[in-house]
């Protein structure tokens, strides 16, 4: 098996209209040769093996915006379009063309409590069986504080706030070829800093 090699060409642009905001954009083109993939062993279906596959091409553009109003209030948004293909020009498995994310954070109660909202969008994707999985948008909500207990950070999160149903492609050696993901879930985290 040969080493996987990637040739990358990228142009990055950055613009700062003032001290509190920033635009960042890039255009890129990646070529992967001797791509290492995993397939079933034909004579032993229960086993898998890694081997070199055809070249892959990825081209795309992304744009990111960041704004800070204070140390505790900020907005960050990004969008990316990419098109990843096999050597024969076919759309690459598990490679969404559209990705977007928005993060907003704000301090409450004189910054004793911090609120964070994140919205993520993932476009349509292909599975190994050439089925198309639909796009989805998830919203996550987090509250955290560092002032409730000394040297302690306490946070509570709701993942998938609006309880969206969605699936992601499974690896080539799994059946079925997609996994349904968790719906709404709650997380509680406590971190102590031993100072």
Image: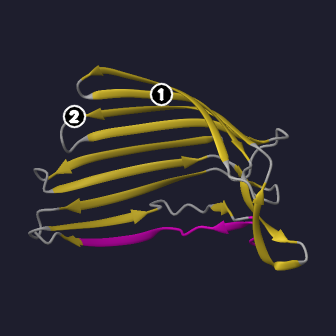
Judging by the rendered image, the residue that carries numbered circle 2 is 69
Task: Tell me how far mark 1 sits from mark 2, CA to CA.
Answer: 22 Å
Hey, which quadrant is residue 161 in on the image? bottom left
Q: Nearer the viewer, residue 109 or 64?
A: 64
Q: Which residues are magenta?
A: 172-190
Q: Residues within 10 Å of mark 2 (few under 14, many from 20)?
A: few
Q: Earlier in the sequence, mark 1 or mark 2?
A: 1
In what element is the residue under mark 1?
strand
Residue 141 position within the rendered picture, expressed as x and y whole percent measured from the top left:
36, 58
**Which quadrant holds the N terminus?**
bottom right
The residue located at (54%, 47%) in the rendering is 121
Residue 153 position within the rendered picture, expressed as x and y whole percent measured from the top left:
20, 66
Judging by the rendered image, the residue that carries numbered circle 1 is 25
The residue located at (11%, 63%) in the rendering is 147
Return the residue found at the far front.
2
How many dots with numbers?
A: 2
In the rendered image, the vertical position of residue 12 relative to residue 8, given as above or below: above
The residue located at (48%, 68%) in the rendering is 184
Q: Residues within 10 Å of mark 1 (few under 14, many from 20)?
A: some
On the picture, is 188 further left or further right than 46?
A: left
Residue 160 position within the rendered picture, expressed as x and y whole percent measured from the top left:
47, 61
Hey, which quadrant is residue 23 in on the image? top left
Return the residue found at the far top.
17
**Which quadrant holds the C terminus?**
bottom left
On the question of residue 176 being in view, the answer is no
Residue 178 position within the rendered picture, expressed as x and y whole percent measured from the top left:
71, 65
In the rendered image, the vertical position of residue 12 relative to residue 173, given as above or below: above
């Amino acid at each position: 098996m040969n080493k996987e090699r990637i040739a990358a060409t990228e142009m990055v642009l950055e613009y700062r209209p003032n001290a509190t905001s920033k635009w960042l954009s890039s255009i890129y083109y990646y070529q992967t040769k001797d791509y290492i993939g995993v397939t079933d062993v034909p004579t032993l279906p229960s086993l898998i093996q890694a081997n070199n596959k055809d070249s892959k091409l990825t081209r795309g553009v992304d744009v990111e915006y960041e704004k800070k109003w204070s140390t505790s209030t900020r907005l960050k948004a990004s969008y990316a379009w990419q098109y990843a293909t096999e050597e024969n020009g076919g759309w690459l498995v598990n490679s969404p063309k559209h990705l977007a994310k928005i993060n907003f954070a704000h301090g409450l109660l004189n910054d004793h409590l911090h609120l964070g909202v994140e919205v993520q969008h993932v476009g349509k994707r292909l599975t190994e069986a050439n089925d198309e999985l639909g796009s989805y948008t998830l919203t996550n909500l987090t509250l955290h504080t560092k002032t409730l207990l000394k040297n302690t950070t306490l946070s509570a999160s709701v993942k998938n706030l609006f309880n969206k149903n969605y699936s992601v492609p499974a690896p080539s050696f799994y059946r079925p070829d997609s996994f349904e993901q968790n719906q709404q879930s709650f997380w509680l985290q406590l971190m102590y800093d031993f100072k």
